Image: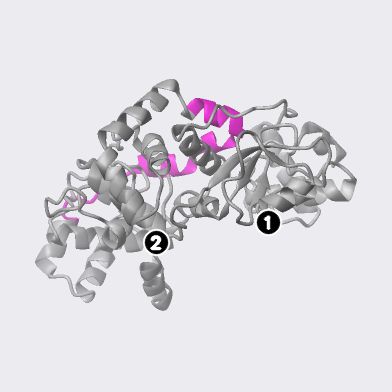
């Protein structure tokens, strides 16, 4: 769900534009990959064995084009993903791997709730890790011309894993986008951040929970996680404030937020770091204070709804109560969201792709036009706004 391009591979890619080749016949494309692998210094016999079983998989393209789940609002999405069974399993796994989490918190400063939430959402604590052939998925997505820069380098990372005995081209399976294991990491991520957590000499993210959890923690640190710091905290809002201050672009200290009426929903502030007020369904819905670590989540997955749900679930697994859903104004359907995006685009706003998803650019455009129209600038689009436009 969250392909990440390792910085080193991205640097190599940007310095060699020819590596971005895509399209054409799949067989010719694979021959090009093989030739490039040999140029990179891999033995021709090893390359032949690695690519011997590769096939194009149309189901991968279908999955890539159909991510409609991200059209759901935060409350609906969160309630769908956070079942009581996942809560109970999280508590059970926290106890089962208590020593592993102790090591993680000592070595990387990542709270167990954070990793448990990713583990739950990505693979249901390892129960279902995906049944797509990983090499086929990567080759199919690299051949497709939508995001070849992202996936082509991962093929060569998988080849490196193969040479180390940690990847089987015909048998390694995972998610449709090429991620492997319990916390779903791409081959390049595994090379850069893989940890042998159980001490058996291999990094096995599919079969070893200690390996998967410690590798996930190392990757979060690599992506900028601040050790032993919070990520989000549920808050209550005043009835009136300048709603244009909400969103990730504005940061104030908790003390400064408190001056305008923002309060922790329970307890005290978790940190004095500058943080942002995020209201995923407008000023009448749920509200959270997002600390700097929250931004690291977007390096794992770029969907705002997924990120906020994972971040909230992490706090829930640490003992936070069920969030207050409030009484937000009804949101837009996917079709209505596309209409809104087209109208905003026609007014000169950059909404990114017209896809019916309330992404970061669409939120910014909504907030700007709300302010222009004298509406509460809370970045939550409603039928009222659509009609005004």
Q: Looking at this view, is 252 or 349 the one in front?
A: 252
Q: Looking at this view, is 77 or 310 the one in front?
A: 310
- Depicted 79 relative to depicted 193: above or below: above
Q: Which mark is residue 251?
A: 1
How far apart in space, not on screen, are marks 2 and 1 (Cα)?
Answer: 23 Å
* Relative image position of residue 209 (x, y in whole percent): 24, 41
Residue 111 falls in image quadrant: top left
Residue at the spot 39% in from the left edge and 66% down from the top edge: 21
Q: Return the residue found at the far top.
A: 84
Dot 1 crowding, Cα within 10 Å, few <14, some 14–19, many 20+: many
* Relative image position of residue 184 (x, y in whole percent): 34, 45
Q: Horizontally, is 71 left or right of 23 in the view? A: right
Label 2, on which residue? Answer: 222
Q: Earlier in the sequence, mark 2 or mark 1?
A: 2
Front position among marks 2 and 1 = 1
First to last magenta residue range? 51-80
Q: Is residue 170 rendered magenta in the image?
A: no
């Amino acid at each position: 769900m969250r392909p990440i391009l390792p910085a080193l591979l991205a640097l190599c890619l940007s310095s060699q534009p020819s590596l971005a080749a895509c399209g054409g016949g799949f067989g010719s494309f694979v021959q090009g990959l093989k030739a490039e692998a040999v140029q990179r210094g891999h033995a021709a016999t090893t390359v032949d064995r690695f690519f011997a079983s590769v096939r194009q998989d149309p189901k991968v393209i279908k999955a890539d084009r159909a991510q409609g789940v991200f059209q759901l609002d935060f409350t609906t999405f969160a309630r769908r993903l956070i079942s009581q069974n996942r809560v109970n399993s999280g508590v059970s796994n926290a106890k089962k791997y208590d020593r592993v989490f102790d090591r993680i918190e000592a070595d990387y400063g990542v709270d167990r709730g954070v990793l448990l939430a990713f583990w739950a959402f990505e693979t249901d604590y390892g129960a279902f890790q995906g049944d797509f052939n990983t090499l086929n998925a990567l080759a199919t997505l690299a051949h497709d011309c939508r995001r070849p820069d992202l996936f082509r380098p991962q093929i060569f990372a998988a080849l490196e894993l193969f040479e180390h005995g940690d990847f089987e081209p015909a048998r390694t399976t995972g998610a449709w986008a090429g991620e492997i294991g319990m916390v779903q990491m791409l081959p390049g991520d595994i090379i850069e951040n893989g940890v042998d957590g159980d001490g058996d000499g291999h990094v096995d993210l599919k079969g070893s929970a200690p390996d998967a959890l410690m590798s996930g923690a190392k990757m979060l640190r690599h992506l900028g996680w601040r050790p032993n710091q919070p990520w989000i905290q549920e808050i209550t809002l005043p009835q009136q404030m300048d709603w244009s201050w909400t969103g990730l672009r504005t940061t104030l200290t908790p003390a400064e937020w408190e001056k305008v009426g923002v309060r922790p929903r329970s307890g005290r502030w978790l940190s004095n770091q500058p943080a942002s007020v995020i209201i995923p369904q407008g000023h009448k819905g749920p509200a959270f204070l997002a600390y700097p670590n929250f931004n690291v989540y977007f390096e794992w997955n770029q969907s705002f709804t997924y990120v906020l749900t994972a971040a909230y679930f992490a706090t829930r697994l640490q003992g936070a109560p069920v969030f207050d859903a409030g009484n937000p104004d009804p949101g837009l359907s996917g079709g209505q969201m596309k209409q809104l995006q087209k109208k905003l685009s026609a007014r000169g706003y950059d909404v990114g792709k017209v896809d019916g998803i309330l992404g970061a650019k669409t939120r910014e455009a909504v907030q700007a036009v709300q302010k222009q129209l004298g509406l509460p600038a809370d970045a939550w689009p409603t039928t009222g706004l659509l009609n005004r436009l």
